[in-house]
């Protein structure tokens, strides 16, 4: 899941989805605000229409009593506590009111003053529900006298209409949002196809199944692909030249060393011959060691650097069986399967060869090589059924030139060379007791 969250596609879809959600939510709020104002204006228009009826129908008689020719015609004024109310006042006294008020009065004292009698206000009705109230002062038919008309509509009607529209908008915008996110996903998927193709191509190069990016790409991406292919080719040329130069260097050094070794063997009986032979052997080992380091350093993390373990182990087992033919050693390679590591084949041969050779020296009958893996890493194990190494001596074995048993042939460089090589590939080597009774050497390398 973490890798998925880090992907470019996931981030674009997430950001687009968040923006779509905010845009639709903001649009819905604006539309609802507009609709609420529209509905409120619609109700206010109804109230004003009924007030116009009262303007033409209400007046005072000469005796000061109200003469209402006809009440407002809307039947909702006859339903108790409907929120549709009207009443007519003279000098603060209610002269007549709608049956819906059930004998109660609308409290308008909070917003009606001597200087202000008009406008729309939201107040609480006698039953506690909110209502939209409009007032208007008109001539009473007697000079100097005025009537105050009050009419209202329930706020519940406005609220219910807005809630109903909000529910429909929510469903509609939800469907629209999902549709837009799906459309964005497929657009991004199509648009990022070249990037996915480049990713797969680089993965193939990592696995060693290709040495360059193939295929046609959009104009904006093709230049990147061309540059990457040029870089791969350039690195390959540099690597090939470096290997050739290392080979030439090794050849130029080893030939004179071979001549010196042959001369030293001719003087083997003398102390000088032994000394020269020992020193030339040490020089050859050091040259091989540093050439291996240089070769590994030049190939660490290079694209396409990949080696399958089983073929290398089989070749080494075949050679070691010939070398240790008299001991009749058995090699168990069944645990390798399709294991592959990201390193040069020559380096894997040197690391595995040193470990398997060391196991053969100490094994009684059996050498086991197997592999496990987790999270892009491969763990190679080389085990034997020999006497093993005491735990307090394990660290000493990895030191350059150290040997615990001088009776075994060698210079004590094998494990230290393996350690230096594996560290160049950002791996590690671990020694432990084997379940077969001897030593277990574990190589931690990047998976191929």
Image (tube, grey):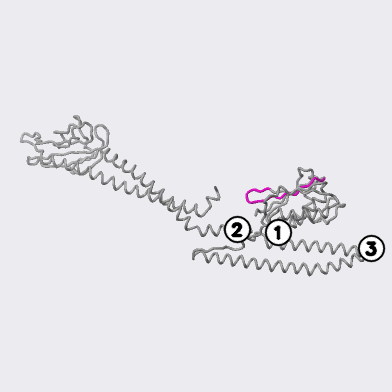
Above or below 315: residue 253:
below
In the picture, residue 227 is in which quadrant?
bottom right
Residue 159 forms part of the magenta stretch: no
Comparing 109 with 262, the one in front is 262
Q: Nearer the viewer, mark 1 or mark 3?
A: 1
Real-space Cα distance between discs 2 and 1? 18 Å
Q: Which residue is mark 1?
A: 345
Above or below 29: residue 153:
above
Above or below 436: residue 319:
below
- Answer with mark 1 or mark 3, whichever residue precedes in sequence: 3
Q: Residues within 10 Å of mark 2 (few under 14, many from 20)?
A: some
Comparing 388 with 105, the one in front is 388
Residue 6: x, y in percent? 53, 52
Secondary structure at badge 2 equals helix
Comparing 272 with 109, the one in front is 272
Above or below 387: residue 293:
below
Residue 149: x, y in percent? 16, 39
Secondary structure at badge 3 equals loop
Residue 336 horizontal side relative to residue 217, left or right: right
Q: Which residue is mark 3?
A: 269
Secondary structure at badge 1 equals helix
Q: Do labels 1 and 3 touch, CB within 8 Å?
A: no
Residue 385 forms part of the magenta stretch: yes
Mark carried by residue 204:
2
Q: Which residues are magenta?
A: 372-386
- Answer with mark 2 or mark 3, whichever residue precedes in sequence: 2
Comparing 435 with 50, the one in front is 435
Residue 200: x, y in percent? 56, 57
Q: Nearer the viewer, mark 2 or mark 3?
A: 2
């Amino acid at each position: 899941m973490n890798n998925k969250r880090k992907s470019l596609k996931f981030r674009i879809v997430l950001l687009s989805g968040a923006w779509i959600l905010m845009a639709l939510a903001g649009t819905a709020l604006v539309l609802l605000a507009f609709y609420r104002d529209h509905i409120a204006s619609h109700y206010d228009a109804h109230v004003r229409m009924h007030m116009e009826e009262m303007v033409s129908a209400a007046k005072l008689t000469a005796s000061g009593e109200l003469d209402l020719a006809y009440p407002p015609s809307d039947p909702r004024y006859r339903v108790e506590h409907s929120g549709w109310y009207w009443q007519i006042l003279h000098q603060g006294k209610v002269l007549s009111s709608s049956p819906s008020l059930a004998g109660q009065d609308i409290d308008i004292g909070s917003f009606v003053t001597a200087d202000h009698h008009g406008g729309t206000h939201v107040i609480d009705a006698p039953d506690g529900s909110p209502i939209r109230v409009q007032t208007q002062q008109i001539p009473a038919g007697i000079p100097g006298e005025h009537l105050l008309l009050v009419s209202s509509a329930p706020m519940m009607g406005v609220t219910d209409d807005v809630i109903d529209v909000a529910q429909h908008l929510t469903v509609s915008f939800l469907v629209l949002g999902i549709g837009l996110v799906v459309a964005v996903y497929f657009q991004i998927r199509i648009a990022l196809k070249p990037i996915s193709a480049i990713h797969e191509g680089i993965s193939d190069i990592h696995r060693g199944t290709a040495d360059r990016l193939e295929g046609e790409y959009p104009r904006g991406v093709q230049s990147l692909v061309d540059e990457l292919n040029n870089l791969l080719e350039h690195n390959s040329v540099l690597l090939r030249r470096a290997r050739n130069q290392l080979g030439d260097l090794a050849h130029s050094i080893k030939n004179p060393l071979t001549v010196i070794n042959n001369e030293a063997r001719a003087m083997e009986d003398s102390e000088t011959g032994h000394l020269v032979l020992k020193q030339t052997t040490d020089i050859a080992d050091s040259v091989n060691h540093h050439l291996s380091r240089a070769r590994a350093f030049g190939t660490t993390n290079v694209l396409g650097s990949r080696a399958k373990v089983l073929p290398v182990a089989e070749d080494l087992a075949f050679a070691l069986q010939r070398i240790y033919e008299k001991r009749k050693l058995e090699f168990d390679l069944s645990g390798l399967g399709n294991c592959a590591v990201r390193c040069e084949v020559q380096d894997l041969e040197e690391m595995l060869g040193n470990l398997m050779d060391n196991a053969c020296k100490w094994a009684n009958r059996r050498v086991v090589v197997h592999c496990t893996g987790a999270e892009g890493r491969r763990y190679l194990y080389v085990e034997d059924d020999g006497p093993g190494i005491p735990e307090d001596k394990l660290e000493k074995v990895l030191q350059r030139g150290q040997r615990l048993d001088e009776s075994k042939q060698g210079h004590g460089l094998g494990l230290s060379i393996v350690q230096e090589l594996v560290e160049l590939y950002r791996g590690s080597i671990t020694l432990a007791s084997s379940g077969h009774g001897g030593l277990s050497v574990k190589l931690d390398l990047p998976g191929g």
